RNA sequence: GCUGCUGUAGCUCAGUGGUAGAGCACUUCAUUGGUAAUGAAGAGGUCAUGGGUUCAAGUCCCAUCAGUAGCUCCA
């Protein structure tokens, strides 16, 4: 008599000993098919494991749970580490080897560093280890013994981790497979044969415990799946994702250029990309006017004094372009043999003045606020500017449009009273909603950053902070989608709401942001005269629905996979002539469309129609207008739609009306094969 | 900034120490066609930059610049 207790507490009874597989079968055929292995008391057991006894606690692990995949991948990480230890000479320190969304990695410190040329050897060794089919055996040891084991293995990271990271654990578990033993919480798969297919992906540097001041380790990335088909599918998806990468599409579609000679992270907008950017600006401007914003312009530089008052200099000096010093001062300093360090010290001390390329727009806007006396009747004052700012981002961090050194924020600063704060925040959120809504971007996450209750770095009255955090929360609620509240994520000057999207490779980027600020009004001594005829301190809201035009457009290119909706497409339609005989009619059609306000070009080459259509498809044109003798005779165009394909001939006026309506309504139409939006 | 990889024609890439290559794009000519590639010819290069090794360097070594995967950072 054997009985098994399932995770839901139910008991299954059997006449004699049973295998895990048989238990699964007794529950259902589907489960038996999906079952990969069992788990008894955290110990994985294979499907043919014989269960005996009463009330044996059994969990059946299936393929359709991510947990199974993660367990298998983590076991594969052990196999990989074991293979590396067999292959590489010299000392090898193991760090951590967790799973990630797409696979797993293991961190090593090696005397003989890894390179990609080691991959085939490591993969072959892994295959050998898997073929041996040795189980992962769990060992539980008391602290002292555990430390001793790691010390004997000369695994100093593990010793440190037991003493610090796992200081509260009385016992520690290890998993051993053949000669390889590793401190590990588990669980593992019952047999390495469960690792269906694996592949080493890349090597990268990573700091021990994520701390830049600690040792830099080598991180070996890999992935694994239960079947070769799944791995192949994954690799194919990765390839597809690369094709919609905005850096690839930007080049292919001629949207922007970044030139070595101009400088790292400095974007040159080509006509097509500039057009898209202008459309987006016009779009948001329309809504800003409706919401009572005032547009301003401010210069790209400002005196150091401005940033000393704001507190951005010298505190953020390292992430700014060096200050601009006037010519006379510069030559005097050069004669004195002044070093960069001295120059910087003198600047912070205020001994010499200079100008900074603006790293943000707020100080300039504050000075506009402060340029006249303000009454409570003037508030809220909303100053908006597409303000270009420059930041000295670390060289290794720069890439494409998503992290650059010069970028334009769709910035605005709202000067409000405490009573107005909540409503104004809701207004800001509304704009963000309009932006994401117009793009059909639904897949973004919202984070409300609150102060750390134990922190002491925050400026402003705690009572006002409570009100502001509450206001942020309520504003976020108006989005009608879930958001996270994160303690300690607020800036020191106020709470904020951030909007984060993923790019085509799964990296997260913050786009829109709405931030409450108690600090700058204080530092600049801003006031307004209240109804009580006494001066009061306004509160500032910094907000940018797009975030930066560069980053937003980068993410947007990937979201649409380059197939922009008609209102954003730089080239909305192209006239294709069937032969040169129809060129006159084609040019007439092109001209009429242009007169109707559409962005249209013509392809009058002596190519075959098929070739012209192919080129148009590759350029991701929303519409192609095919004209031949038949159309010339009937005054029609044959419309080829990016989504629907050939729509047949229709009168030119009908086609124009259709396009104008689609532009007017900012319709977002998605083809089925463009992935449905990675962002 | 750090670790790994990469840099060859406008683009995508081949080229393991011995005369610089392909496809696409471009130009010209022929062709005049109805929904994803007509044919032929031509032009196009300081092999990222600067040093070094060698009889000889696109190829090997070093440095710099840039790109890239990741780490760290991001007012």
Image (cartoon, grey):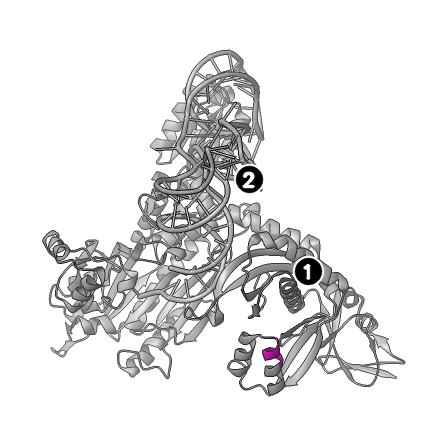
- Label annotation for residue A336: none
Left or right of A69? Residue A34 is right
Relative to B58, residue A243 above or below: below
Q: Residue at x 32, y 50 (%)?
A: A281
Give the structural element (helix, strand or loop) at label 1. Answer: helix
Between B30 and A164, which is closer to the camera in this rendering?
A164
Q: Which residue is mark 2?
A: A644
Disc 1: host chain: A
Q: CA distance from mark 2 to mark 1?
A: 48 Å
| The N terminus of chain A lies in quadrant | bottom right
Between A154 and A18, which is closer to the camera in this rendering?
A154
Between A23 and A158, which is closer to the camera in this rendering?
A158
Q: Going from the N terminus, do you reach mark 2 or mark 1 first?
A: 1
The image shows residue A440 at horizontal and vertical percentages of 46, 54
Left or right of A522? Residue A595 is right
Between A428 and B69, which is closer to the camera in this rendering?
B69
Relative to A457, residue A234 above or below: above
The image shows residue A555 at horizontal and vertical percentages of 43, 53
Q: Residue at x 59, y 82 (%)?
A: A147
Q: Which residues are magenta?
A: A149-153
How many residues crowd around disc 1 within 10 Å: few (fewer than 14), some, or many (20 or more)?
many
Relative to B29, residue A312 above or below: below
Taking the image as drawn, is residue A621 in sight?
Answer: no
Relative to A161, residue A626 above or below: above
- Label annotation for residue A126: 1
Any magenta on residue A151? yes
């Amino acid at each position: 008599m054997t009985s098994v207790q399932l995770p839901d507490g139910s008991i299954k009874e059997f006449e004699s000993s049973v295998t895990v597989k048989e238990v699964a079968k007794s529950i259902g055929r589907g489960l038996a098919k999906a079952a990969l292995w069992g788990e008894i008391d955290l110990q994985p057991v294979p499907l043919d494991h014989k269960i005996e006894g009463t009330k044996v606690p059994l969990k059946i692990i299936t393929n359709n749970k991510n947990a199974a995949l993660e367990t298998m991948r983590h076991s594969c990480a052990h196999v990989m580490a074991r293979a590396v230890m067999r292959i590489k000479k010299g000392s090898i320190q193991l760090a951590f080897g967790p799973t990630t969304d797409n696979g797993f990695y293991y961190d090593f410190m090696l005397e003989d560093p890894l390179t990609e040329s080691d991959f085939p050897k490591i993969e072959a060794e892994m295959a050998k280890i898997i073929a041996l089919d040795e189980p992962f055996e769990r060992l539980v040891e008391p602290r002292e013994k555990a430390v001793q084991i790691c010390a004997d293995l000369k695994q100093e990271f593990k010793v440190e981790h037991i003493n610090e990271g796992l200081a509260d654990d009385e016992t520690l578990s290890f998993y051993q497979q053949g000669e390889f033993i590793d401190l590990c919480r588990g669980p593992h798969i019952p047999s390495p044969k469960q690792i269906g297919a694996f592949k080493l992906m890349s090597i990268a540097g990573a700091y021990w415990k994520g701390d830049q001041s600690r040792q830099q380790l080598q991180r070996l990335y890999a992935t694994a799946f239960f079947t070769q088909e799944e791995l192949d599918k994954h690799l194919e998806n990765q390839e597809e994702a690369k094709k919609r990468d905005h850096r690839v599409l930007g080049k292919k579609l001629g949207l922007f250029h970044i030139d070595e000679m101009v400088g790292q992270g400095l974007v040159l907008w080509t006509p097509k990309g500039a057009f898209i950017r202008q459309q987006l600006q016009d779009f948001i401007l329309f809504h800003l006017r409706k919401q009572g914003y005032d547009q301003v312009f401010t210069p790209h530089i400002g005196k150091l004094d401005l940033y000393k008052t704001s507190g951005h200099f010298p505190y953020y000096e390292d992430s700014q372009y060096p200050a601009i010093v006037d010519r006379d001062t510069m030559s005097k300093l050069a004669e004195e043999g002044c070093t960069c360090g001295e120059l910087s010290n003198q600047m912070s001390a205020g001994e010499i003045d200079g100008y900074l390329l603006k790293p943000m727009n707020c100080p300039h806007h504050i000075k506009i606020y402060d340029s006249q006396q303000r009454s409570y009747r003037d508030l809220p004052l909303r100053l908006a500017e597409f303000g270009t700012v420059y930041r000295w981002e670390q060289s290794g961090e720069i890439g494409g449009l998503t992290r650059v050194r010069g970028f334009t924020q769709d910035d605005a600063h709202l000067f409000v009273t405490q009573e107005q704060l909540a409503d104004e925040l809701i207004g800001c959120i509304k704009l963000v909603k309009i932006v994401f809504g117009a793009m059909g971007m639904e897949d973004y996450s919202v984070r409300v950053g609150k102060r750390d209750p134990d922190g002491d770095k925050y400026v402003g009255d705690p009572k006002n902070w409570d009100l502001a955090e509450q206001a942020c929360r309520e504003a976020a609620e108006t989005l009608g989608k879930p958001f996270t509240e994160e303690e300690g994520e607020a800036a020191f000057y106020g709470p904020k709401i951030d909007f984060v999207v993923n790019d085509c490779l799964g990296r997260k980027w913050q786009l829109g942001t709405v931030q409450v600020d108690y600090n700058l009004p204080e530092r600049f001594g801003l006031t307004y005269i209240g109804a009580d005829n006494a001066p009061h301190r306004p509160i500032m809201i910094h907000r940018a629905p797009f975030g930066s035009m560069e980053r937003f457009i980068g993410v947007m290119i990937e979201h649409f996979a380059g197939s922009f909706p008609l209102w954003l497409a730089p080239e909305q339609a192209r006239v294709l002539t069937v032969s040169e005989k129809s060129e006159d009619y084609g040019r007439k059609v092109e001209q009429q469309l242009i007169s109707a306000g559409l962005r249209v070009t013509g392809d009058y080459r002596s190519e075959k129609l098929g070739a012209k259509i192919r080129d148009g498809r590759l350029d991701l044109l929303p519409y192609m207008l095919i004209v031949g003798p038949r159309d010339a005779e009937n005054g029609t165009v044959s419309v080829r739609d990016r989504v629907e394909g050939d729509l047949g001939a229709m009168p030119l006026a009908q086609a124009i009306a259709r396009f104008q309506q689609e532009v007017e309504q900012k319709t977002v139409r998605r083809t089925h094969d463009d992935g449905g939006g990675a962002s």
